[in-house]
Image (tube, rainbow, N blue to C red):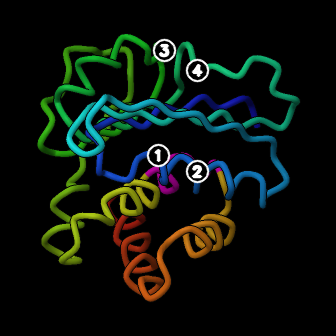
């Protein structure tokens, strides 16, 4: 495995920071090195938000994501803002409400993350877990077992089955 640099972006309240923490925790459970950082706008909900995760078999000597291997964008604004940080050959995962960008040097996965959470599962707040399932199907960056264990350790008590369903829906979004 190489060093993976991932950036999750969208608006505040979409659970992207929690998603980054879960992915980093899953990597650690798999015996890898992982680092997670975050930033968000002044509004707690609705402001711009991003989480960054670095996963590596090697020691992580530089803790910032500069040119990401994978960019998740759940809003048009976040895609427009961070697209230039996605390296050529990188993976862009966008919600189907986001327009395909004009770049032919990246792999684009345009999938219904937000509508799956809202309509299929009835809970918009599990969009981050749906996204993690999709990212797993694309990259297999962590094991399914570790990802589920990390999800279940971080979600509110009483929502475990909902979040397991969200993960499963996310796996199925990528063909």
Disc number at residue 21? Answer: 2
Residue placed most toward the observer, 88 or 3: 3
| Cα distance between the residues tagged 4 and 3 | 11 Å
- From this view, report whether residue 57 is shown above or below residue 112: above
How would you rate the neighbour count of disc 3 (Cα within 10 Å): few for under 14, some for 14-19, many for 20 or more?
A: some
* Image quarter in which the N terminus is found: top right
User: Tag 4's secondary structure?
Assistant: loop
- From this view, report whether residue 126 is shown above or below residue 32: below
Q: Sequence order check: which comes first, mark 2 or mark 3? A: 2
User: Tag 3's secondary structure?
Assistant: strand
Rendering coords of residue 170 (x, y %): 37, 64
Rendering coords of residue 100 (x, y %): 17, 28
Residue contact between numbered discs 2 and 1, judged by CB atoms under 8 Å: yes
Q: Mark 2 or 3, which is nearer the eye?
A: 2
Residue contact between numbered discs 4 and 1, judged by CB atoms under 8 Å: no
Disc number at residue 100? Answer: none
Q: Sequence order check: which comes first, mark 2 or mark 4? A: 2
Q: Sequence order check: which comes first, mark 4 or mark 1? A: 1
Q: Please state if 99 lies on the left or on the right of 110 as rendered.
A: left
Identify the residue position indicated by label 4 in the image. 65
Q: Mark 4 or 3, which is nearer the eye?
A: 4
Identify the residue position indicated by label 1 in the image. 17
Rendering coords of residue 58 (x, y %): 87, 31
Residue placed most toward the observer, 114 or 140: 114
* Image quarter in which the C terminus is found: bottom left
Q: Sequence order check: which comes first, mark 3 or mark 1? A: 1
Disc number at residue 87? Answer: 3
How would you rate the neighbour count of disc 2 (Cα within 10 Å): few for under 14, some for 14-19, many for 20 or more?
A: many
Residue placed most toward the observer, 131 or 2: 131
């Amino acid at each position: 495995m190489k060093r993976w640099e991932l950036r999750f972006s969208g608006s505040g309240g979409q659970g992207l920071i929690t998603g980054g923490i879960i992915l980093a925790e899953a990597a650690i459970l798999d015996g890898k090195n992982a680092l997670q950082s975050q930033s968000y706008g002044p509004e707690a909900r609705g402001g711009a938000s991003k989480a960054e995760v670095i996963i590596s078999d090697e020691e992580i000597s530089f803790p910032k994501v500069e040119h990401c291997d994978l960019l998740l964008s759940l809003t048009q604004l976040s895609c427009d803002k961070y697209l230039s940080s996605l390296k050529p050959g990188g993976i862009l995962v966008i919600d189907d409400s986001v327009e395909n960008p004009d770049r032919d040097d990246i792999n684009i996965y345009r999938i219904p993350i937000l509508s799956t959470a809202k309509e299929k599962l009835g809970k918009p707040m599990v969009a981050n877990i749906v996204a993690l399932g999709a990212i797993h199907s694309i990259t297999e960056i962590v094991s399914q077992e570790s990802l589920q264990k990390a999800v279940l350790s971080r979600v509110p008590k009483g929502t475990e089955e909902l979040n397991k369903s969200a993960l499963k829906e996310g796996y199925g979004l990528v063909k």
